[in-house]
Image: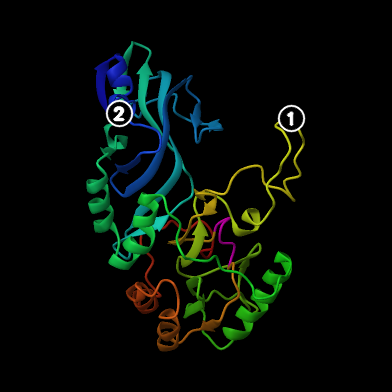
């Protein structure tokens, strides 16, 4: 962090660039281990008293931002809020040395400046992104972050405001989600019954693949963390997802047609649009770690559950992720290796 006298320019070091961008423009924000392609909507400066941090355009949470690391007290926190209608991330994975395509939000919220009690400010230089506005440069940068087929099938349509031809994973029969989970657990337990604790296992269908290492409890059955299957090595998944936070069950709910003042039953309706282009959802192959609210265990119906790498690689070539077989091979061959960047919170990973 760097000490400076308080000026509007230093309080908002990226403001002059972002204030000049027109709504709808595609921009690229480049951080140390993250590159975000954003369809720009707006830019705001948000000033708050210390003790709270803004996490998105709607919410803030309690925070410990009232002191700098050296102990000096903060009088005011200045947050740069970059709002987007769509956002596609490429996040560096330290184990496989690849940028993983993901989308969990559409905005980027940065606490770039802290006004101290003596009137000076500290600017967090580490959080200031490089910003690219030229469409040609954005495309070249994104090309360097991913593989050729992925760029042409996903990144290029995103930049052009077009949809893709991918489909989200699902079960062949329309089952209630709870039934899906029970059936999936039974399938997994049966398929992995002969595998040793810590053995590689592949769970896959055309639209979704999970890589994990079998975790068994004292009863020799799959070890569960709540409703989640666990793994002795951090789980890696490939899954066709919607942009932003939306899950398949939410996307399939009808849009609520009432007014702002009407009550909406969130179990039946959604009160927001599906993030996409021209009224159609943008579905893309996402790659990541851990199970999350978008990928609770497995969304689709598995076509194959196996601990045999050769069998897994043959099936993998039939999926939407066939450009990345090296990740499957490396994961299987390093079942005992856990990269130090993945912190163990519980006995196993999920």
Q: CA distance from mark 2 to mark 1?
A: 37 Å
Residue 37 lies, with reference to residue 213, above or below; the image says above
- The earlier-in-sequence mark between 2 and 1 is 2
Would you say residue 295 sits in the magenta stretch?
A: yes
Q: Nearer the viewer, mark 2 or mark 1?
A: 1
Residue 205 lies, with reference to residue 130, above or below; the image says below
Q: Position of residue 290 (x, y in %)?
A: 49, 61
Which quarter of the rendering shows the N terminus? top left
Verify CB contact (< 8 Å) between mark 2 and mark 1: no
Which residue in the structure is indicated by mark 2? Answer: 14
Instruction: Tell me the number on the disc at residue 261.
Output: 1
Would you say residue 307 sits in the magenta stretch?
A: no
The local secondary structure at tag 1 comes to loop
Task: Please give the name of the residue rendered at 76% of the width and 34% of the height, measured from the top-left corner.
Answer: 262
Task: Please give the name of the residue rendered at 39% of the width and 52% of the height, measured from the top-left corner.
Answer: 158
Which quarter of the rendering shows the C terminus? bottom right
In the rendered image, the residue lying farthest to the top is 118
Q: Position of residue 15 (x, y in %)?
A: 32, 25
**Residue 283 vs residue 288, the one in the foreground:** 283
Magenta-colored span: 292-297
**Count of marks placed on residues:** 2
């Amino acid at each position: 962090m760097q000490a400076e006298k308080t000026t509007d320019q230093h309080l908002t070091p990226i403001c002059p660039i972002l204030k000049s961008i027109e709504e709808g423009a595609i921009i690229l924000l480049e951080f140390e281990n993250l590159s975000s392609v954003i369809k720009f909507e707006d830019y705001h400066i948000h000033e708050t008293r210390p003790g709270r941090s803004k996490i998105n355009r709607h919410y803030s949470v309690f925070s410990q931002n009232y002191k700098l690391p050296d102990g000096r007290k903060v009088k005011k926190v200045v947050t740069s809020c970059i709002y987007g209608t769509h956002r596609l991330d490429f996040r560096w994975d330290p184990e496989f040395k690849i940028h993983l395509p993901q989308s969990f939000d559409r905005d980027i919220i940065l606490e770039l400046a802290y006004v101290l009690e003596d009137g000076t400010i500290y600017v967090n230089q580490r959080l200031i992104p490089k910003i690219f506005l030229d469409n040609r440069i954005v495309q070249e940068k994104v090309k360097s972050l991913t593989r050729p087929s992925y760029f042409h099938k996903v990144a290029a349509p995103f930049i052009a405001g077009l949809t893709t031809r991918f489909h989200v994973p699902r079960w062949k029969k329309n089952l209630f989600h709870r039934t899906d989970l029970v059936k999936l657990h039974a399938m997994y337990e049966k398929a992995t019954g002969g595998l040793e604790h810590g053995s590689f296992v592949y769970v896959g269908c055309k639209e979704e693949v999970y890589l994990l290492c079998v975790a068994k409890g004292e009863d020799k059955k799959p070890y569960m963390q709540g409703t989640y299957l666990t793994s002795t090595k951090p789980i890696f998944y490939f899954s066709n997802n919607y942009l932003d936070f939306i899950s398949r069950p939410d996307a399939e709910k009808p849009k609520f047609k009432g007014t702002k003042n009407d009550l909406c039953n969130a179990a039946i309706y959604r009160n927001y649009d599906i993030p996409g282009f021209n009224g159609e959802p943008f579905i893309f192959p996402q790659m990541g770690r851990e199970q999350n609210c978008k990928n609770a265990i497995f969304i689709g119906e598995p076509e194959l559950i196996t601990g045999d790498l050769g069998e897994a690689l043959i099936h993998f070539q039939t999926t939407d992720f066939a450009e990345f077989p090296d990740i499957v091979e490396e994961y299987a061959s390093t079942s005992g290796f856990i990269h130090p960047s993945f912190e163990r919170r519980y006995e196993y990973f999920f």
